[in-house]
Image (spheres, rainbow, N blue to C red):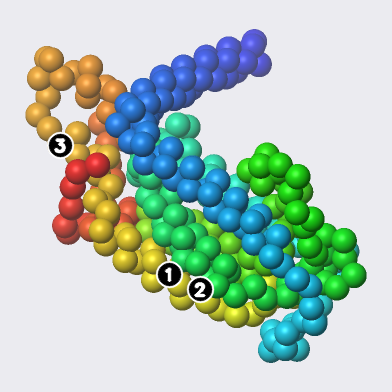
C-alpha cells in the first residue's frame, strides 16, 4: 500500500511540475516573440553579416598561394598535434559554442532567469559584426601562406580553381568553411569564443562556470596554435582586438532591462494576469517564500545572490 501511495504522489508531482514547466515555457515564448517582433531587423542584419563574413573568407581563398610556413614562436614552443589530433581544437570550440547557445535559451526552462534571449543575441551579433568587419579588412590586406595541413604546398585544397559561375562563389558549403585558407589574421574561432565568454562573464551568474570558460578559451588558444590552424599572431591579435571591440560597442548599446522590475509595481485587479505572467518569466511561483531579489548592477548580473546597492533599468 505504501508503494502504491508513493507512486501516486510521484505521478502527481511529475504532472504538476510538467504543467508548471509548460506554462513557464509558453509565457517565455510569448515574451520572446514580442521582443523578436521589435528587434527582428537587428537579428536579421546580424545574420546577413555572418553570411557576408563567410563569403569574404571563401573569396580570399581564391587569392591564397601556398608557400613556406613563416617563422612562429608558438610553433617552436608548442609541439605539433598532427592531423590525427587536430580535432581536439575543434572539439573545445564546439563545446564553448554549444554551451553558450544553450545558456542563452535557458530562460525557457529554468526558474532563475536573468536575461532575455532575443536581446542577448542582438548584443552578441553586434559584437561579432564589429570584430568580423575588422577581420575582413586585415586578411584581405595581406595574404599569408596558411600553416594548416590542407593549405601547405602540395595540397590540392590549398588553392581554389576559378569559379565557373556566380553560384559557386555565393554558395557557402561546410566543406569550404572547414578547409578554407588565407583568412588568417585574426582567428575567427577566437572571435566567437571571446565574445561568448565575455557575454557570460557579464550576464552569467555562476562564478565557477565563468572561471572554467576562461580556462577553456586559454586552452583553445594554445590548441589552435598546436594544431597549426593559425599563426600565433592570429591568436594574439584576436585577444586584444576582440576585447577592445566588445568593450567599446558595449558602451554604446542600451543596457539590458532588469527582469525583476515588474514585481516592484503595485498590484491591481487589471494587472493580476500580468503579475502571474511575470512570476512565470522570472521564476517565482505563487508562494511568497520563493520571491527573492534577482537584480543587476549597471547591467552586470549579480553572482549567486550577492547584495546589490544600485539597480539600473534602461530601455530595451
Residue identified by numbered label 2: 239
Mark 1 and mark 2 residues within 8 Å of each other at the beta carbon: yes
Residue identified by numbered label 1: 243
Note whether 193 is above or below 8 in the view shown. Answer: below
Q: Secondary structure at mark 2?
A: helix
Q: Secondary structure at mark 1?
A: helix
Mark 1 and mark 3 residues within 8 Å of each other at the beta carbon: no
The Cα atoms of the two marked residues, 2 and 3, are separated by 41 Å
User: Which is more foreground, mark 1 or mark 3?
Assistant: 1
Residue at image coords 15%, 19%? 271
- From the top left corner, tell me how far across and down residue 75 is, in percent: 74, 84
Residue at image coords 55%, 46%? 51
Disc 2 residue crowd, few under 14, some 14–19, many 20+, Cα 10 Å: some
The Cα atoms of the two marked residues, 1 and 3, are separated by 35 Å
Front-most of 293 and 82?
A: 82
Front-most of 309 and 64?
A: 64
The C terminus - image quarter: top left
**Left or right of 80, for residue 9:** left
**Left or right of 219, for residue 245:** left
- From the top left corner, tell me how far across and down residue 108 is, in percent: 45, 31
Amino acid at each position: 500500500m505504501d508503494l502504491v501511495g508513493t507512486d501516486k504522489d510521484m505521478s502527481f508531482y511529475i504532472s504538476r511540475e510538467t504543467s508548471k514547466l509548460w506554462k513557464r515555457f509558453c509565457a517565455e515564448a510569448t515574451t520572446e516573440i514580442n521582443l523578436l517582433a521589435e528587434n527582428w531587423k537587428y537579428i536579421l542584419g546580424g545574420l546577413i553579416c555572418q553570411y557576408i563574413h563567410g563569403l569574404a573568407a571563401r573569396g580570399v581563398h581564391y587569392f591564397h598561394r601556398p608557400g613556406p610556413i613563416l617563422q612562429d614562436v608558438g610553433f617552436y614552443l608548442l609541439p605539433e598535434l598532427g592531423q590525427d589530433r587536430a580535432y581536439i581544437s575543434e572539439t573545445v570550440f564546439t563545446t564553448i559554442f554549444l554551451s553558450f547557445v544553450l545558456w542563452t535559451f535557458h530562460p525557457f526552462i529554468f526558474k532563475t532567469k536573468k536575461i532575455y534571449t532575443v536581446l542577448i543575441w542582438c548584443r552578441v551579433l553586434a559584437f561579432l559584426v564589429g570584430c568580423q568587419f575588422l577581420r575582413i579588412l586585415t586578411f584581405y590586406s595581406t595574404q599569408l601562406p596558411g600553416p594548416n595541413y590542407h593549405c601547405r604546398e602540395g595540397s590540392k585544397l590549398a588553392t581554389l580553381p576559378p569559379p565557373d559561375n556566380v553560384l559557386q562563389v555565393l554558395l557557402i558549403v561546410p566543406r569550404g568553411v572547414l578547409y578554407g585558407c588565407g583568412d588568417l589574421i585574426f582567428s575567427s574561432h577566437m572571435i566567437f569564443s571571446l565574445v561568448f565568454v565575455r557575454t557570460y562573464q557579464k550576464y552569467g551568474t555562476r562564478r565557477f562556470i565563468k572561471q572554467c570558460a576562461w580556462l577553456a578559451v586559454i586552452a583553445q588558444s594554445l590548441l589552435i596554435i598546436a594544431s597549426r590552424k593559425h599563426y600565433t599572431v592570429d591568436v594574439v591579435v584576436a585577444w586584444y582586438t576582440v576585447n577592445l571591440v566588445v568593450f567599446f560597442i558595449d558602451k554604446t548599446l542600451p543596457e539590458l532591462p532588469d527582469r525583476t522590475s515588474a514585481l516592484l509595481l503595485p498590484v491591481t485587479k487589471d494587472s493580476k494576469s500580468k503579475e502571474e505572467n511575470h512570476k512565470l518569466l522570472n521564476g517565482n511561483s505563487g508562494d511568497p517564500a520563493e520571491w527573492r531579489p534577482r537584480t543587476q548592477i549597471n547591467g552586470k548580473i549579480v553572482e549567486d545572490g550577492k547584495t546589490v546597492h544600485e539597480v539600473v533599468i534602461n530601455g530595451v
